[in-house]
Amino acid sequence: MYGACTKQCRCLGTTERSMTQLDHQVHSIGPEVTGSRIFKFIAFLYGIAAYLVFFVTILYAIGFVMGLVVPKTIDTGTDTPTAEAVIINLLLMTLFALQHSVMARSQFKAWWTQFVPKPVERSTYVLLASLSLLLLFWQWRPLPAIIWEIENADLAATLATLSFAGWVLVFTSTYMINHFELFGLHQVTNHLVGKETPPPRFKTPMLYKFVRHPIYLGFIIAFWAAPVMTAGHLLFAAVTTLYIFVGIALEEHDLVDLFGEEYRQYKQRVSMLIPWRRSV
């Protein structure tokens, strides 16, 4: 992605003809390279590696948010003046949001796959999203002021269980659609065996019949069901929830473009996040 900008800048002084030739070269080398056995095998290993990085990242995220097991959580780390900590944390979340949203747009993918082979595009997206999250975990600054703290042990345990249930909902919802396609393994496996990955088709399995975005619902539950809510945790939960709603708007715009009237009718039938509401 970053090298592409440099290449484009060098092309500014070229003639229209030379730019056309360069564009043709970029596109023409793709099939020759991506069709080779060596590339297929390397792409498969790359997809597995990207998935493993994602898997470790999401497991760490559970511990980070819930304050369990991992060495650095949302409430631990370098002591930093409040204003500085807020700015750093907002920048970290903004970086993730930009990477996660921009790279998911169809216009970006059309440009990006000129430089990144299509079979590994999803794996690359997953890998970069995971790395941006790991950066957030590493550089996050705690804001330890207590917003609320549940003193009743049973209620505190209930909230912790609810938070964990949110993470379970995230995982199970990915398997209801296609977990391995969502995280790039399906694409590199198909490419390895010489099979075309079929175009996406609209389907609403299980929980998707009740809410349009059970994955996002799971994240919201996981972030907000906290027995102890610090200022840092509140900042994280509030900003990520805001980003979820922005992400839903962007995602549904793309889904309407992709599936048309079928998705519009789905939006009318099924609520966004709250199962018992029929419209949003």
Image (cartoon, helix red, strand yellow):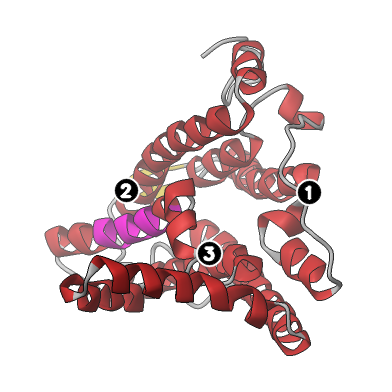
What is the x, y in percent for residue 18?
30, 74
* Residue at x 39% of width, y 36% of height: 246
Residue sticking out furthest to the bottom: 38
How far is mark 3 from mark 2, CA to CA? 26 Å
- Crowdedness near tag 3: few (<14), some (14–19) or many (≥20) residues, C-alpha within 10 Å: some
In this rendered view, identify the residue nearer to me: 58 or 106: 106
Q: Name the residue under label 2.
A: 235
Q: Is the magenta stretch mostly helix, strand or loop?
A: helix
* Residue at x 69% of width, y 84% of height: 39
> What amino acid type should be assigned to the residue bearing mark 2?
Leu
> What amino acid type should be assigned to the residue bearing mark 3?
Tyr
Callouts 3 and 1 close, C-beta under 8 Å: no
What is the x, y in percent for residue 71?
50, 78
Q: Mark 1 points at which residue?
A: 175
What is the x, y in percent for residue 139?
33, 73
Q: Mark 3 points at which residue?
A: 125
What is the x, y in percent for residue 251?
50, 37
Query: Quick check: 238 left or right of 191?
Result: left
How far is mark 2 from mark 1, CA to CA? 30 Å
Residue sticking out furthest to the front: 17
Residue 93 lies in the magenta stretch: yes
What is the magenta range? 89-100
Of label 3 and label 1, which has the lower sequence position?
Answer: 3
Query: Quick check: 249 left or right of 154?
Result: left
Residue 237 lies in the magenta stretch: no
